[in-house]
Image (spheres, grey):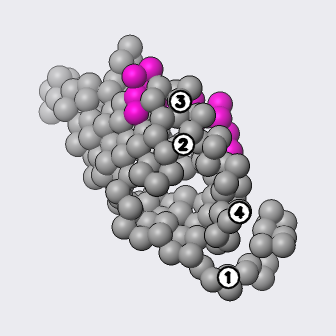
Amino acid sequence: MNLETLCARLEALESRAAIEALISAYANAFDRIDPDLLRTLWHADARLDLPGFGEGLGPAGIVAMAQTNWKKMPHMHHWMANPLIQIEGAVATATVAADCLFHDIEQGPVQVSGLYHDRFERREGQWRFTARRFELHFLTPLANWKPVAGSELFAGV
C-alpha cells in the first residue's frame, strides 16, 4: 500500500469518526438540555427541520427552537442507530435511525421513532451539520407508563 492510499484511508476514517461524533453530540445536547453543545454542531447556514416540533435556521435559530421544545418536553432520551454515512470529499450525507423517549408536559410519556436525513460539510477543517430533517415513523403516547426505578427527574411522572 502506498502513502497516498494510506493517507486517503486515514482521512476517510477520521471523517467518519467526526460525523459519528456529531450524530452522538446532537442526541446528548438535546438529552442534557445543553444549548452550548447544540450550538457547536452546525455551520452558520444550517437548517434543522423537525416536522411537528419546529424548524431552526443557523445555530441561534436551532437553539431557540430547541429551547421551545425543552420547555414542553423537559426530559428526553435519544438513541441513534444504524448510521449510513456516504462521504465524498468535504461533503457527506447520512441516514440515522432514531428512537426517543420523552416526557411531554401535556401528553405525558411519549415514544417517537423515525429516520434523520443528514447533510454535513467539512469547512476550514471542521465537519458540521448543514441540514438535518426528521422523518417521523411513529409518535406513541405511553399511557400508564411509570418508571419504577431510576432518575429522580421522573418523580411524579
Q: Please, what secondary structure does the residue beneath circle 3 have?
A: helix
Q: Label 2, on which residue? A: 25
Quarter of the image with the N terminus is: top left
Q: Can you tell which of label 2 and label 1 is closer to the viewer?
A: 1
Amino acid of disc 4: Ile
Q: Can you tell which of label 3 and label 1 is closer to the viewer?
A: 3
Amino acid of disc 2: Ala
- Could you classify mark 4 by the number of other residues whose Cα lies within 10 Å: few (under 14), some (14-19), or many (20 or more)? few
- Decide: marks 3, 4 in contact (CB < 8 A)? no
The numbered mark, 2 or 4, whose residue comes first in the sequence reads: 2
The numbered mark, 2 or 1, whose residue comes first in the sequence reads: 2
Q: Please, what secondary structure does the residue beneath circle 4 have?
A: loop
Image location (x, y in percent) of residue 17? 40, 40
- The picture quadrant where one finds residue 143 is bottom right
- Could you classify mark 3 by the number of other residues whose Cα lies within 10 Å: few (under 14), some (14-19), or many (20 or more)? some
- Decide: marks 2, 1 in contact (CB < 8 A)? no
Q: Label 3, on which residue? A: 61
Q: Which residues are magenta?
A: 32-47
* Residue at 53 percent of width and 29 percent of height: 61
Q: Label 1, on which residue? A: 145
The numbered mark, 3 or 2, whose residue comes first in the sequence reads: 2
For this rendering, which residue is in front, 102 or 4?
102
User: Can you tell which mark lies on residue 105?
Assistant: 4
The numbered mark, 3 or 1, whose residue comes first in the sequence reads: 3
Amino acid of disc 3: Gly
* Inter-mark Cα distance, 3 to 2: 18 Å
Image location (x, y in percent) of residue 30? 60, 47
* Residue at 80 percent of width and 63 percent of height: 153
Measured along the vertical axis of the image, is residue 90 above or below residue 51?
above
